[in-house]
Amino acid sequence: MTSNGKKPTVAYFCMEYGLNRELPIYSGGLGILAGDFLKAAKDENAPVIGIGILWKQDYTQQYIGDDRRPFDVYPNFDYSFLKDTGVSVQLNVRGEEVTCKVHMVDQYGNAPLYLLDTNFPGSSHGWMTSKLYGGVEQDRVAAEMILGIGGIKALRAMNIDIDQYHFNEGHAVFAGIELIREKMQEQHMSFEDAMTETKRQVAFTTHTPVEAGNEVHDHGLLEYMGAYNGLNRDQMTRIGGDPFGMTVAALRLSHTANAVSQLHGDTARQMWKDVSDAAPIISITNGVHGGTWQSPSIRNAYKQGRDLWQPHMDLKEKLVRYIKEKTGKQFKKENLIVGFARRAAAYKRSGLIFSKPEVIEPLLQEGKLQLVFSGKAHPKDEPGKDIIQNIMRMSEKYPDSIVFLENYDMYIGELLVQGVDVWLNNPRRPMEASGTSGMKAAMNGVLNVSVIDGWVPEGVEHRSSGWLIDKMLTEMDQGDNEDVQDIKALYRVLLDEVIPTYYNNRTKWLEMMHSSITMSKDQFSSARMLKQYFSEMYEKNFEDDAPQMMAGAEQQNYSQQNQYDQYPQQ
């Protein structure tokens, strides 16, 4: 609590937000999480505001060409429906004064979100807020300066007093540089005192254990772009190292950092153990907004103790109609449908299920197994586009049993997590930091078939609320590599458990659907996540014994995660 007994006011900084498909300023899970967080804050009347960027051309509109390969389209979106705050702020980027207009979004059941925009008539700097994660490194740094430096300036211009600044990923770290600059130039603090005081104000969430997701920038580029923002090279190196690591800087500028699942906490602490003066990394598992992702018909049937099958079949019918409308393919709603919707990245192993054609082909030919894929590749990720192209080839080989839905967005995501029977998740461990799509599926009674990674071991119970691929491994598999092990186990799950239960034991399937909803609806909600953020990150730093509490939180987290030591980590 703050000194006056109220909850601290939090400014939540994120590069992307997924609130509604009509506001396409998100690329995937990070943005959807941020959007769900703001919706939870609104539901709970929590003192949270969001800071982000209004991306004129989205991340990408991605379609499939005649060569079966994804291609990218960048239309200019009309955001005239957003509220203009009348506020503009200026910052210096690459020696030029850049003006950012500030828009406000609050119409999607969310806490206020303020979006900075350089794409307006007369501006020569529209390229800075054009494409999310697009362009070259200069484009990325410019956008990160707008988010961080511009975001702090926007808060000052709107006279919004903030107690805690939450950086959701390292993209926002230049907000910390601006906070230090303010203290040094306006309050005449020394650099070390300014950094110490800033550290008390900042919390940080690290998401990805993938190296490419933790940005590093050359100091020469940062100095050229103006990202030093009044600091010198020695000071910036003290914060972010050389080269300048955005995650490293965020760890050094925050009082507490969190990983996004218990297992990810282990991974993150190991990844960043050599960073001096870093914040302790605790674990606060991600959550999703039930009001957005759980079907009302499923929710009502569950609450009233009614049969779940009919509302589930209605949702399957809606998905099957969409597949027919968009692809011409006619799936059978009575038959098993497995969903796999992910960013196209090699570690997610979208093609694992196809590894042994002699096993999978009969199921596909009979239509006993139907597979629905969706997802986008980064526009510059050619291997990612190869993954989608290969799925398209498989869909042509088995036109009645495999489909890929192009231009994945929140609407397609909703159709899938509500309308499939099974949600497949088989990344290489421990690369899935959390993974929230499986939580959304679980809330709808869709059963997870998953490796033990991310959030899964905290919730899914084998043969009760889903199936854990790892539980199907035998001693005979232990000499195999991870891919070979997992494909054997995946086929055992499908052939010996999932398919027989679906077709021959409706009572058991319905029991598992009910258990899945019970397991997920509260434990993996964004409301629970929000409460943990306040109690374990925001509020504790205002207590007199904050340092002791931080140490205690770190120790508590280590004891909590011990229960997960039984699960394989590779």
Image (cartoon, rainbow, N blue to C red):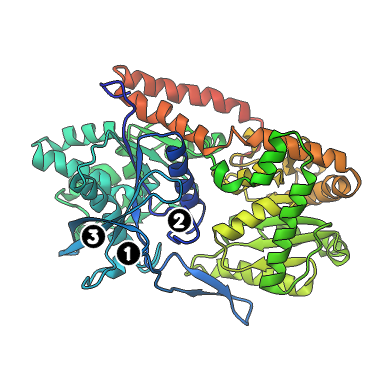
Residue at the (54%, 42%) spot, across then down: 288
Q: How many marks?
A: 3
Q: CA distance from mark 3 to mark 2?
A: 29 Å
Q: Quadrant of the N terminus?
A: top left
Locate residue 39 relative to residue 197 in the image: left or right: right
CB under 8 Å between discs 1 and 2: no
- Tell me if mark 2 has few (under 14), some (14-19) or many (20+) residues whose alpha carbon lies within 10 angstroms of its own: few
**Residue to which mark 1 is pinned:** 129
Q: CA distance from mark 1 to mark 3?
A: 10 Å
**Residue to which mark 3 is pinned:** 100
The type of residue carrying mark 1 is Thr
Locate residue 535 relative to residue 466 in the image: left or right: left
Locate residue 161 relative to residue 401 in the image: left or right: left
Residue at the (36%, 26%) spot, across then down: 539
Q: CA distance from mark 1 to mark 2?
A: 21 Å
- The image quadrant that residue 463 belongs to is top right
Q: Could you say where residue 411 lies in the image, as x and y percent from the top left?
A: 58, 59
CB under 8 Å between discs 1 and 3: yes
Locate residue 466 relative to residue 535 in the image: left or right: right
Residue at the (78%, 72%) spot, across then down: 399
Q: Is 299 drawn above or below residue 71 in the view shown?
A: above
**Residue to which mark 2 is pinned:** 212
SS state under label 1: helix
The type of residue carrying mark 2 is Ala
Q: Could you say where residue 57 lies in the image, as x and y percent from the top left?
A: 40, 69
- Which mark, residue 425? none
Q: Which comes before the other along the chain, label 1 or label 2?
A: 1
- Tell me if mark 1 has few (under 14), some (14-19) or many (20+) residues whose alpha carbon lies within 10 angstroms of its own: many
